[in-house]
Image (cartoon, rainbow, N blue to C red):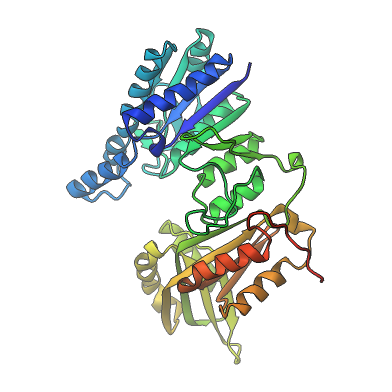
Amino acid sequence: MARIVMKFGGTSVSNTDRIKNVACLVKAEVDLGNEVAVVVSAMSGTTDQLVVWTNAVAQMKGSSREYDVVVASGEQITVGLLALALQNLGVKAKSWLAWQIPFYTDCVHGNARIVRIDTSIIRKDFGEGKVAVVAGFQGIAPNKSITTLGRGGSDTSAVALAVSLEADRCDIYTDVEGVYTTDPHFITKARKIDFVAHEEMLELASQGAKVLHTRAVAVAALHGLPIQVLSSLDKKPGTSIVEEGELVEKQVVTAIAYSTDEAKVTLIGLTDCPGVVGTIFEALADADINVDMIVQSVSQSGNFVDLTFTVSSSNINLVCNVLNVLKKDLGYIDIVYNTMVCKISVVGVGMRSEPGVAKIMFRTLAECGINIQLISTSEIRISVLISSGYLKLALQALHTAYGLDANCKFIKSNN
């Protein structure tokens, strides 16, 4: 007997037929003798509609207590329907909203973080042979207000619950068969990966891969929780996300992620003195703006610098407003920005020991006539910023160059 948390996203519960299908999947685990807790999202499109209605009334933009009250309501429908569907199959089941469990969070509305989960109710359900059907994406703050965890938060709900329950694994059901070498809707030669290390998945998620929420992967990695990503619409094996030591064979490059939500910002003519860059990024952080790639270049005279960095393209107007307020103090000459850019990242734990990975990336892009605007790296990742018009060409070329196409293997470089 195993203890499993099963999570189903919005597409998996998008209508009553799919909810009945999910009930069958849950029953199959129960029939194996497993203890099962289920975390569900709102039906596909429901949260978007709730956000539209909320903003039409008050333009709250995700920061209001009442915003969370409204957008958290979508999951209440799915937990009730799924519990009913399970009961109809003869499975003992009970629905719970996150505040009833409860999922304790901080007080940050629209993007709360889970502090602690009281699992006593669910453990009691297990003892009575019941399936606990729990609403994802939501929690309760110390002041008793309903909170939401941000988009993709149901993944985090499921993983955090699995950790708190000391579950054997967390199964994330979605509309794809698993984690692919790149976006299969974009690159037809992409193939499903059987095993991915937590660290690889964390890099992929943070660099644009939309299979799993970044915070969910971070929690799983911290606690060594195995995750399985698989489709709720077919019975094919999915992708297992495990600790690196469990990988039998480490790929040099496991997958390629990309992000089109990018903007490159350059501050021209900054005074080259201590504290200037810190002032800029402190102001951006205070405005809740995340900065990614950063490059600083010094003028020939040595008295001025140009500072270039990337942010989400949706934040570009806010970035300019924040920096314009600082212009008098910083004394820079101009702000230049470009939203017609994208980021491509190659990821693989095997990069730690394999030379020549960066050479292949740069050579491949050069042969395609693609100019690299910015570069950033980690121990297992190389990211480049390029013109968005070259995205598909770059992905196809790199996917082939690293041997990620179906029935191909990576050929070691002669370094």
* Residue at the image position 63 percent from the left and 54 percent from the top: 406
**Left or right: where does residue 200 sit relative to residue 311?**
right
Kindly give the residue lying farthest to the front in the view shown: 407
Q: Nearer the viewer, residue 82 or 320?
A: 82
Where residue 330 appears, as percent x and y from the top left, is: 46, 77
Farthest residue to the right: give it. Answer: 414
Query: The N terminus appears in which quarter of the rendering?
Result: top right
- Does 343 appear above or below 272? above
Q: How many marks?
A: 0
Residue 112 in the figure: left or right of residue 373:
left
Quadrant of residue 14 in the image? top left
Q: Residue furthest top?
A: 128
Q: Nearer the viewer, residue 178 or 133?
A: 178
The C terminus sits in image quarter = bottom right
Quarter-wise, where is residue 189 in the image? Answer: bottom right
Q: In the rendered image, is residue 293 in sight?
A: no
**As drawn, 157 above or below 79:** below
Q: Residue at x 57, y 24 (%)?
A: 4
Please determine whether, in this image, residue 309 is positioned above or below residue 11: below
What x and y, as percent, mark residue 318? Answer: 36, 65
Q: Residue at x 37, y 14 (%)?
A: 88
Q: Is residue 300 at all visible to an observer of this figure?
A: yes
Q: Left of 12 or right of it: where is 126?
A: right
Residue 69 at x, y = what percent?
29, 35
Q: Residue furthest bottom?
A: 301
Q: Is residue 371 above or below residue 312?
A: below
Residue visible at 48% across and 22% down?
26
User: Where residue 345 sits in the image (x, y, percent)?
Assistant: 59, 62
Is 52 or 251 nearer to us in this picture? 251
